[in-house]
Amino acid sequence: MKKVLALILALTLVIGASAALAADYEIVSKGFQHQYWQAVLKGAEEKAAELGVSINFVGPANESAYEEQLGQLNSAINASPKAIGLAALSTETCLDAIADAQSKGIPIIGFDSGVPGAPEGAIKANAATNNYNAGALAAEETWKVIKDRVAAADGAVRIGISAQDAVSDSVVSRGLGFIDKIGELAAAEGYALKLEGNERYINDAKVESKDDAKIIIETLVPAQVTAELSAIDCQNLLNKADLIALYGSNQHSAEAMVTANENLQKLGTGEGQIIGVGFDSGAVIKAAVKDGTFLGAVTQAPVAMGAALVDLLVKAAAGEAVADVDTGCQWYTAENMDSEEIAQNLYD
C-alpha cells in the first residue's frame, strides 16, 4: 500500500511539474532562426512580460518545411494552451490541425501572413502589416523628393515599379497602395497619371489612366519569379530616358534593383540620378540605403507585430472580442536606420 501511495505521489509531482512548465500561449511562426522572426519573438516576449503571461515560440528550420511546422502546430495543440498564434506556411497543410484546435475550444490568432483561406471563423483575428498602407508610405516619401522634378520636366516623366508577381496579396497590395497614393498626390498638384505594364496593376488601381498624363507609372512583373528576370525588368526600366524613380515592392524586387544598377550606376539621390525606393530589409537593401543608392525603404514592424499578437492571444483566451490589428511599418533612411526604434526591425 505504501508503495502504491508513493507511486501516486510521484506521478502527481511529475504531472504538476509538467503543468507548471506548460506555457499559457503557444506561438508557431514560419521560421525561427531568421532575424525577422527573432524580432517578432522580441516583441512577443516583451508584451508577455508586461502582461504576466508565458509563451512558447517555435518555428520550422525554413519556410518550405511544411510538415515540420505541422508537427509543431500539433504539439502546440496537444499542450492545451489558452490560445495559439499561427503564421501558416500552408493553410491547406494545417486544416486538420486547425479543426482539432477548434474542437478543443482553443482560439487561434494569425500573424505576419496569417492563415489565408482558413475556414470562416477559425482564425479570430490577425496581427499583420497593412500592405496597402505600407505601399502608400513608400509613395509619400518618394513624392517628397520627385515632385519638383515632375514640375520642372518639359514632358512626361516615368515612375517604375518592379513587382515580384501579380498574384500574392501582399505584393499586389504594396504596388496598388503605391500607385493610388502617387495618383492622389499628383492630382492635388493638377497632374494626371497613365498606367502601363502589368494588367492586374492597371485594372485594380483606383487611379484613372489617361493617355495625355504628366506622369507614367509602369509596373513590370517577370514571367517567373527569378532574381535574373526581375533584374532584367529593372534594367529595362532604368534604361528609359524619362524614368525619375523606381520602386521595388518587396525584398526580392528591391534586391533586383541593386543587381540591375551594378553596371548602370543610375540610382542615387544626386542631380540627374534616378530615385530608388525599396521594401523590406536584408543585407543588400540595408547597404543600398546606407550608401545612398536608395533614398530609403519601408520595413515592416516585426517587434510591434509580436507585441500585438500576444495582446490578441490574451484577449481571445479571455473571451473578449478581437479584430485584425495593423502592426504598422516604418520608413528608414541612412539617417535613421541605426536608431534603436528602427534597427530592431531591420534584419539580414
Image (spheres, rainbow, N blue to C red):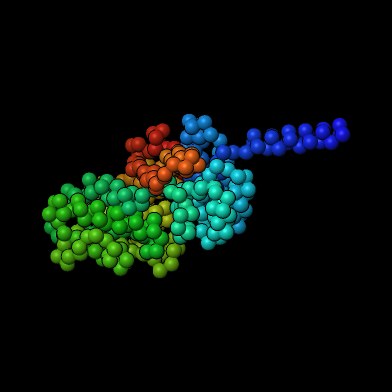
Q: Looking at the image, which residue is at 46% across and 54% down?
A: 121
Q: Residue at x 58, y 50 (%)?
A: 104
Total numbered labels placed on residues in the image: 0
Position of residue 287 measured from the top left corner of the image (x, y, whole percent): 41, 45
Whether residue 201 is visible to the viewer of this picture, yes or no, is yes
Tell me: 102 left or right of 228: right
Residue reaching furthest front?
1
Residue 240, visible in the rendered structure? no
Compared across the picture, whether 320 is left or right of 240 comes to right
Along the line of sight, the residue nearer the viewer: 88 or 253: 88
Query: Which image quarter: residue 9?
Result: top right
Percent position (x, y) of residue 4? 84, 36
Task: State whether residue 165 is above or below residue 295.
Answer: below
In the rendering, at what x and y percent does residue 48 appear? 50, 34
Residue 341: where, in percent of width, then height? Answer: 39, 35
The residue lying toward the viewer, choosing from 47 and 38, is: 47
Residue drawn at 39 percent across, 37 percent down: 342
Determine whether, in the image, residue 345 is placed left or right of residue 210.
Answer: right
- Image point 73% across, 33% down: which residue? 13
- 244 w.r.t. 298: above or below: below
- Asked whether 141 or 19 is in front, the reply is 19
Q: Nearer the viewer, residue 26 or 235?
A: 26
User: Split into 4 quadrants, where in the image is the N terminus?
Assistant: top right
